[in-house]
Image (cartoon, rainbow, N blue to C red):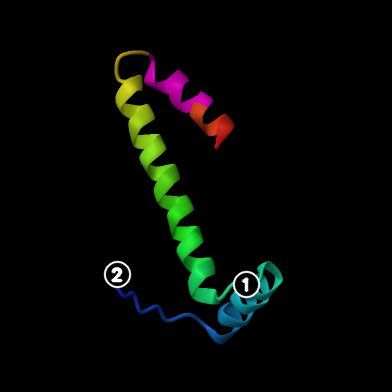
Amino acid sequence: MGTVTLQVSNEKHERLNLIANERGLSVAHLIDETMSNMLAEYEARKRFENRAKQGDIKRAMELLDRVL
């Protein structure tokens, strides 16, 4: 497993702690879940873009933006 060191403002860290506590998670787990969601969305968008190249990409992107 890799390690990522992230520096954030004290205010942001406190806010992350509040959210993590509300969800029963550690800040590290909260950030890991958030990154996983971001990566899944990115990969879905890339797959969609590749498929859309065979059609109307502007229309395809409009549809994708509506669901994401």
Toward the viewer: 55 or 41?
A: 41
**The disc label shown at residue 1, or none:** 2
In this picture, is 65 found above or below 60? below
Q: Position of residue 59 (x, y in %)?
A: 46, 19
What element does badge 1 sit on? helix
Q: Judge left or right: residue 42 versus residue 50.
A: right
In this picture, is 33 found above or below 46? below
**The disc label shown at residue 54, or none:** none
Magenta: main secondary structure equals helix
Residue 30 is drawn in which quadrant?
Answer: bottom right
User: Alpha-carbon distance for marks 2 and 1?
Assistant: 21 Å
Q: Is residue 60 magenta?
A: yes
Q: Residues within 10 Å of mark 2 (few under 14, many from 20)?
A: few
Whether the residues at callouts 2 and 1 have beta carbons within 8 Å, the answer is no
What element does badge 2 sit on? loop
Q: Is residue 23 magenta?
A: no
Name the amino acid type tagged 1. Ala
- Give the residues drawn in magenta, as a range: 56-63
The residue depicted at 35 percent of the width and 79 percent of the height is 5
Marks 2, 1: nearer the viewer: 2
In this picture, is 17 found above or below 63? below
Toward the viewer: 41 or 64?
A: 41
Residue sitting farthest toward the top = 55
Q: Position of residue 62 (x, y in %)?
A: 51, 26
Q: Position of residue 22 (x, y in %)?
A: 71, 71
Label 1 belongs to which residue? Answer: 20
User: Quadrant location of the C terminus?
Assistant: top right
Name the amino acid type tagged 2. Met
Count of numbered circles on the image: 2
The residue depicted at 48 percent of the width and 74 percent of the height is 28
In this picture, is 49 found above or below 6? above
Q: Position of residue 24 (x, y in %)?
A: 65, 71
